DNA sequence: CTCTTTAATTGATATTTGTCAAGCCGTGAG
DNA sequence: CTCACGGCTTGACAAATATCAATTAAAGAG
């Protein structure tokens, strides 16, 4: 671990409270690596050798079964992924691939687990992180089970709009991946966008404009217990 | 907290490593309550006043949105629920109701959080518990997104069969709830059972018999990264 | 035991979603 | 600039799933 990534990483909630000495030891055993786009970083079923931290770029978490594939989440800088597998030392449940050129810090899982046993602040930070992850997945499950694909898309657009703090914004991922993330086919996503036009959604390429937020909201019926990104 | 529940609770992984003194304090502030069937214990959106422990009976975790409802999990003795909400002091994401006459221990959330700050073993036990919960939800998401309802049912039956260590077993819940849990309507569950007959599934009321496990497995294609209950 | 109530099943139908095939469009290589 | 490629869109169709209505079966109350 050369350079100054440690500062960025140190500021992550996961590492912020850790003893300085422990943090330095952890970083000494870690290393940074640059990956080109579309490289598979980890594969479902593998043993967690490293805790991954995305420093720049972005990473797609996905899973395959019986020839089908689905995208489960996108990891943006600066945050970690596959924490649960690392902590429990159990096989990955998801695969991960870079979406773009990305810089990843690899922290040896053994070191992380060892530190977890010793550093109390770190152990507590992991609780916070895991709680958040858990709640995020629960919300996602509710989204999937309680809503139609059209409703999922409508709420997704509202969430993105809120995030961008604007009624006009660009999609942050390819439509094919968005489709997979929302649990539908690209063809249906295309039709779904069309179906939302009457509710005030304008689409041009990956640029979205919500012309009638009231109307869309009335249709989407967002709920804090599904759609709130924090909490 | 009278009686001897503490022993049972103490043996839970979540509390096993805790300082005796701390555990006793936690139990002193808690109390046991008996609930009849179909009582709503907590409601989505409420603030987590208590960490719940199911000592006997069983509890359904569910969620509603826009007039629809879905069952997300069943909690059996002896285990806790809504740990994540308690730890983060954020609103419940799910509601809970008793399925049968149940005995529930209510641990004041504030006490649990206070202890979390003090007792290192407890903090670490929470990590283990949350990791497990997280991984369970991820598996469930994969099940939902990668499989058809027929495949979900087939794999569910194989899991239950494995759990019962027998090719013949009884369903542990009403079919309507199973349908909701599997993300389908009761009508479709009924038809799905019919569709699995050619693969060696016999159904009589809530009694199931898998006459041709090979055949069903060939159809269901179970995966350890979706269907393993442990790991 | 009978009655009442609720769950489960079945058939007919509608809606949603997926599949396949073709064409379109924007981007990057040469 | 042109071409080739991949992603996006569109239409026609098929499959999966939901809805509605009616019936049957099962469980609980008296």
Image: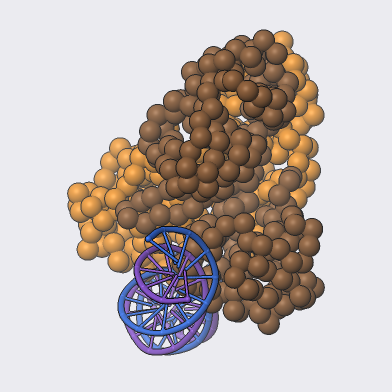
Chain colours: A brown, B orange, C blue, D purple
Is residue B7 left or right of A222 when viewed as pictured? left
In percent of width and height, residue B169 lies at 33, 46
In percent of width and height, residue A147 lies at 59, 65
Which residue is nearer to you in this view: B23 or A61?
A61
In percent of width and height, residue B17 lies at 60, 14
Q: Quadrant of the C terminus of chain A?
A: top right
Q: Is residue B54 above or below residue D7?
A: above
Q: Quadrant of the N terminus of chain A?
A: top right
Is residue B135 left or right of D30 when viewed as pictured? left
In percent of width and height, residue A11 lies at 72, 28
Q: Is residue A110 above or below residue A226?
A: above
What residue is at 62 percent from the left and 57 percent from the top? A172
What residue is at 75 percent from the left and 27 percent from the top? B113
What residue is at 76 percent from the left and 31 percent from the top? B109
Q: Is residue B56 visible?
A: no
Q: Is residue A190 visible?
A: yes
Number of numbered discs on residues: 0
To which quarter of the image does residue C22 belong? bottom left
To which quarter of the image does residue A128 belong? top right
What residue is at 76 percent from the left and 75 percent from the top? A211
Q: Is residue A188 above or below residue B86?
A: below
């Amino acid at each position: 671990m050369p350079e100054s990534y440690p500062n960025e990483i140190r500021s992550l909630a996961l590492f912020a409270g850790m003893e300085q000495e422990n943090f330095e030891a952890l970083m000494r055993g870690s290393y940074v690596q640059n990956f080109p786009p579309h490289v598979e970083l980890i594969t479902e079923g593998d043993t967690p050798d490293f805790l991954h931290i995305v420093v720049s770029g972005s990473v797609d978490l996905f899973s395959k079964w019986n020839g089908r594939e689905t995208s489960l989440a996108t990891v943006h800088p600066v945050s970690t992924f596959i924490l649960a597998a690392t902590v429990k030392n159990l096989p990955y449940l998801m695969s991960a691939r870079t979406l773009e050129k990305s810089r990843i810090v690899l922290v040896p899982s053994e070191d992380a687990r060892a530190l977890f046993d010793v550093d109390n602040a770190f152990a507590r930070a992991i609780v916070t992180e895991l709680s958040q992850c858990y709640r995020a997945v629960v919300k996602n499950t509710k989204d999937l089970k309680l809503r139609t694909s059209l409703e999922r898309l409508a709420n997704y657009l509202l969430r993105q709009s809120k995030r961008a703090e604007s009624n006009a914004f660009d999609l942050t991922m390819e439509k094919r991946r968005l489709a997979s993330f929302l649990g539908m086919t690209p063809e249906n996503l295309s039709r779904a966008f069309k179906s939302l036009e009457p509710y005030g959604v304008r689409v041009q390429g990956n640029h979205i404009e919500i012309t009638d937020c009231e109307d869309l909201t009335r249709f989407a019926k967002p709920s804090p217990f599904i759609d709130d990104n924090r909490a």
